[in-house]
Each structure stands twice: as structure tokens, then as C-alpha cells.
Amino acid sequence: MSPQQIDPNGPLAQSLIPPIYSDPYGLGLPLRWQDEQTGELIEAVRTFFAIQPLTERQFTLVRAYCIHYICAPCWDMGCDGDAECDKELADLREEANALSTAEEVNGWIHRCLGVGIDPL
């Protein structure tokens, strides 16, 4: 499997997971994977959780969702100007685009959990 890199602002990421963020209180929250309407992302995430092999399409969807999630504006507010936090968030955003295996996604999720962000 050799999924292509996805620019979070590029046309592929936008076509897979729209750059729409929930804004009930001006927070810019990410969409929930559980609410995806086609069922494709839900199936891909469930396959990932079951530690089953992902198709290239499923992997691309999971990674696109990770990019969508970590790029949500709400995480910027959590840093509140803290330079170390800003760098960690920027690193996680950059790493999300470079994920190329399910194992890398798993490690990336654990790094997110270490800073209080739970993508899946």
C-alpha cells in the first residue's frame, strides 16, 4: 500500500473529509467519524479498531479523518499562546499528513492522547 500524501487544505482531503468544523460556541470542533453519512469512514475506522487489514481506500479515509481532526481550530485555543504546545500541535499536524501505515496511525493517535486529544 502506498497512499499518497494528503494536504489538509488540498482537493483530495477536502473531497474525502470536508473542511467543515462545528461551531456551536465558536470553538471549531471537528466532525465526528461516527456521524459520517456514507458509512465508508465508519467501516474504515471499525476495521482499524479491529486490527484488520485496511484497503488502500480505508487507510486513506482514516488518515484523511486524522488530518481533519488534528487541523480543527479548537486545538489552537487549547495552547493559549504556549510556544511548546503550539510546536507540539504543529508537529502532530505535520505527522498526520505523513502517516503511511496503520501502525504509524496507531502511534500518532497515542501521541495525540498524550496531549489530551483523542482523534478516534
Image (cartoon, helix red, strand yellow):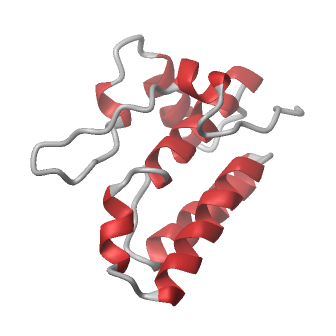
| In the image, farthest residue toward the left | 25
What percent of the width, then of the height, locates residue 92? 60, 65
For residue 89, side relative to residue 22 (left or right): right
Q: Is residue 96 above or below residue 78?
A: above
Q: Residue at x 73, y 57 (%)?
A: 104
What percent of the width, then of the height, locates residue 49? 52, 44
Q: Residue at x 82, y 32 (%)?
A: 3
Q: Work out whether residue 67 or residue 109 is closer to the camera in this orientation and state it.
A: 67
What percent of the width, then of the height, locates residue 96? 65, 53
| In the image, farthest residue toward the right | 2
- Please identify the quadrant where the N terminus is shown: top right
Q: Residue at x 27, y 48 (%)?
A: 28
For residue 13, side relative to residue 101 (left or right): left
What percent of the width, then of the height, locates residue 16? 56, 22
Q: Is residue 66 above or below residue 19?
A: below
Disc tally is: 0
Q: Is residue 116 above or below residue 105?
A: below
| In the image, farthest residue toward the top | 38
Q: Work out whether residue 20 or residue 37 is closer to the camera in this orientation and state it.
A: 20
Q: Residue at x 36, y 22 (%)?
A: 36
For residue 24, side relative to residue 104 (left or right): left
Residue 89 seen anywhere in this rendered image of the structure: yes
Q: Is residue 115 above or below residue 118?
A: below
Residue 49 seen anywhere in this rendered image of the structure: no
For residue 105, side relative to residue 116 (left or right): right
Which quarter of the picture shows residue 27? bottom left
